[in-house]
Image (tube, rainbow, N blue to C red):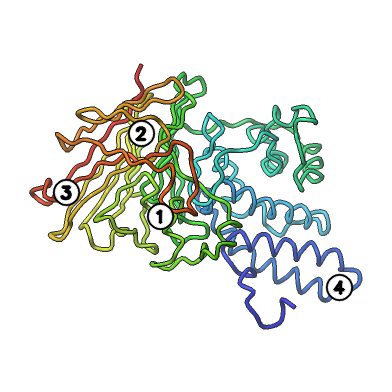
Amino acid sequence: PSFEKGNYGWVNGTNNWNQVCNGGMIAAAIAVAEKDPSLAAKTISRSLDGMPNALKQYAPDGVYPEGATYWGYGTSFSVVTSSLLESAFGTDFGIADYPSFIESANFRLMTTAPSGQYFNFADCGDSEGTNGDITLAWFAQKTGNSLYLQKEKFLIPAESMGTLSRLAGAGLVWLSRFNPKVETSLPSVWKGEGSNPLIIFKGGKDDPHKYYFGGKGGRGNLSHGNLDAGSFVFELDGVRWVIDPGVQDYNSLEQAGFDLWGQCQDCERWTLLTKGNHGHSTLTVDNARFKVDASAPIIDFAEKPVPEATVDLTQLYGGRLKSAHRKFIKDTDHSIIIEDHLVLQDTTKSITWAIMTTAVVYPEADGAVLKQDGKELELKILSPQDLGVSTIMMDPPPLKLDRKIPGLKRVELRIPAYLFADGKGLIKVRLTAHE
């Protein structure tokens, strides 16, 4: 039926559904090839022509635009497809060698903090599972790189594994073929370009602070995308101080008649806490929604002497600002500085700087102290002067259908435009652990 006229966007689509459906069609074609070789050949050929449209999304640095969870989902179908083709024909027709595909395993690892929580941008779950990652195991056997083999997790007692993954059978084959050749290390400062670009700063192997920072650019109307450009997560000592609200159950929203998948400027999706810019640790102008089709690129990046990166947020605001550049600076091994360099329009009314946190917030004259799990983090407002924070309780969340996150708060700096008398503004905030 998929060769007849109809809506079969998955054939040449650019999201995970391309990988899922084309992989399934190739598997089915191989299964019936002896009965109907002509149909099987036609089906496989079409899928091999269509799959590069999804594989291109990994370029140029392996960043999967839909986030770490959907990397696991979409990529799992591509690696199974690669294995099926190699088994049947002795070649995978270039899937494994597609530019940046192998490098995407580094993306998967870079988006996992020392706590095991993800940098959970887009529709991404909160943390990785307790079992070994079977998709990563394919990358391990393909490259011989021990970095991709989660050996300790594969060796946990069988009774602790629960229901096994649908990939468990294939995983046994891949694990049996693993031949260690090398073990690379992950960088402590990393920029991943693509349609949803990322910046990640980490501590070293023996970092006592377990430092983790993830920031991003990108745009909202990507597959499983959110209005989260300019947002970030920040973790120290195993405590996630600044969070992303992540993803929520699709079924309950769909059963309520909620239009979760529309991505127009006025679509319902963006009203959710997990999807709109008001639920993320970013900068909002005139309390308005981001332009959903506007992109925020990384325009500057330096590893040394001080790791820093700048994201151009200007287009997100649809002309409400002349320019907006957000800079992230790792100034010490236990702090991060966020600088927003702004040029206002005559019509600009207000700027709202915000972070999302589950910590307890104690306001102070020039910022706040956050307390969580016996640890403390200082939020210090370096510019503008004489400005205080507002704490907005988000538990319960604004909408009945919103995801409920225990203890969630939005810590805001509300800045009227007139404070920037010359039309140029600097917002500078430092987050640092109390020693």
The amino acid on which the numbered mark 4 sits, given as a three-letter code, is Pro
Direction top: furthest residue: 435
- Give the labeled residue for mark 1: 276
Question: Marks 1 and 2, how far apart in space?
Answer: 29 Å
Question: Marks 3 and 1, how far apart in space?
Answer: 22 Å
**Number of residues whose C-alpha sits closer than 10 Å to that of mark 4, classed few (under 14), some (14–19) or many (20 or more):** few
Q: Is 125 on the left or on the right of 219, as rendered?
A: right
Between circles 3 and 2, the one closer to the viewer is 3
Instruction: Give the mark nearest the N terminus, 1 or 4.
Output: 4
Residue 121, position as x, y percentages in the image: 48, 47
**The label number, if any, that marks residue 416 in the structure image:** 3
Question: Marks 4 and 3, how far apart in space?
Answer: 69 Å
Question: Marks 3 and 2, how far apart in space?
Answer: 31 Å
Q: In which quarter of the image is the N terminus?
A: bottom right
Contact between marks 2 and 4 (CB within 8 A): the answer is no
Instruction: Give the mark nearest the N terminus, 3 or 2.
Output: 2
Residue 161, position as x, y percentages in the image: 75, 34
